[in-house]
Amino acid sequence: MFAGHFAIGLALKARYRKAPTWALLLAVQLCDWIWIVLYFLQVEHFRLFFPLQGAMQLDLYDVPYSHSLFWSAFYALVVFLLFVRADGQRHWAVPLSLAVFSHWVLNWLMLPPILPFANFGPTIKFGLGLGELFPFAELVFEALIVFSCWWAYDRRLQNTTAARSWASWAILGVLIVLLILPLTLPRLF
């Protein structure tokens, strides 16, 4: 669910036009940026597995700080508080905090119950597992998310310059590459 997170950033841009696209695209991946740092510090852990021939997936079996409900909400609150008090960027606070928390919501929809509450408290795990309903379900759902979010973004760009329209199609192309990249990665190893 890589392209889907970026697509949510585009949908938020369609709704909150004053928030910069680059900031929204960074915010939707904040949990993953934290996860990468914590992985290299050996605080959090994951495994690669290949459930279907030619498809690579991650098993996020130990992510209590980067992908838990509590810490995702905390990161969103911190982003909100940082920007609501910033002169000139106050209007960024709501869309950026929504972008940060959208990462957890999208993972909750797609992943099986592996998302922890926090690194403390109840050991409950969250996840609806829509991405495991049938073979390639995650790809199908993520494609629906990508195309619907891009469509909302592209509609916002109607009545703009040809360069912006071209850029919108280029963004869709990048999202499609990100969508199919997990299907080709095992062949790269």
Image: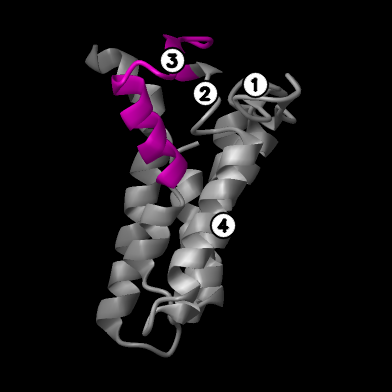
Marks 3 and 1, Cα distance to the nearest angstrom? 13 Å
Point out the tag, 2 or 1, that comes first from the N-terminus: 2
| Residue pictured at 40% horizontal, 24% vertical | 183
Instruction: Say which residue label 3 marks.
Output: 45
In the image, is residue 83 part of the stretch drawn in magenta?
A: no
Marks 4 and 3, Cα distance to the nearest angstrom? 25 Å
Tag 4–tag 1 contact (CB < 8 Å): no
| Residue pictured at 69% horizontal, 37% vertical | 109
Residue 63 circle label = 2
* Percent coordinates x, y for residue 132 in the rendering: 67, 22
| Residue pictured at 64% horizontal, 28% vertical | 131
Point out the tag, 4 or 2, that comes first from the N-terminus: 2
Marks 4 and 2, Cα distance to the nearest angstrom? 19 Å
* Percent coordinates x, y for residue 15 in the rendering: 56, 75
Residue type pointed to by label 2: Val
Point out the tag, 3 or 1, that comes first from the N-terminus: 3
In front of the other: 49 or 63: 63
Query: Which residues make up the magenta segment?
Result: 30-58
Marks 2 and 1, Cα distance to the nearest angstrom? 9 Å
Tag 2–tag 3 contact (CB < 8 Å): yes
- Label 1: state its secondary structure: loop
- Label 4: state its secondary structure: helix
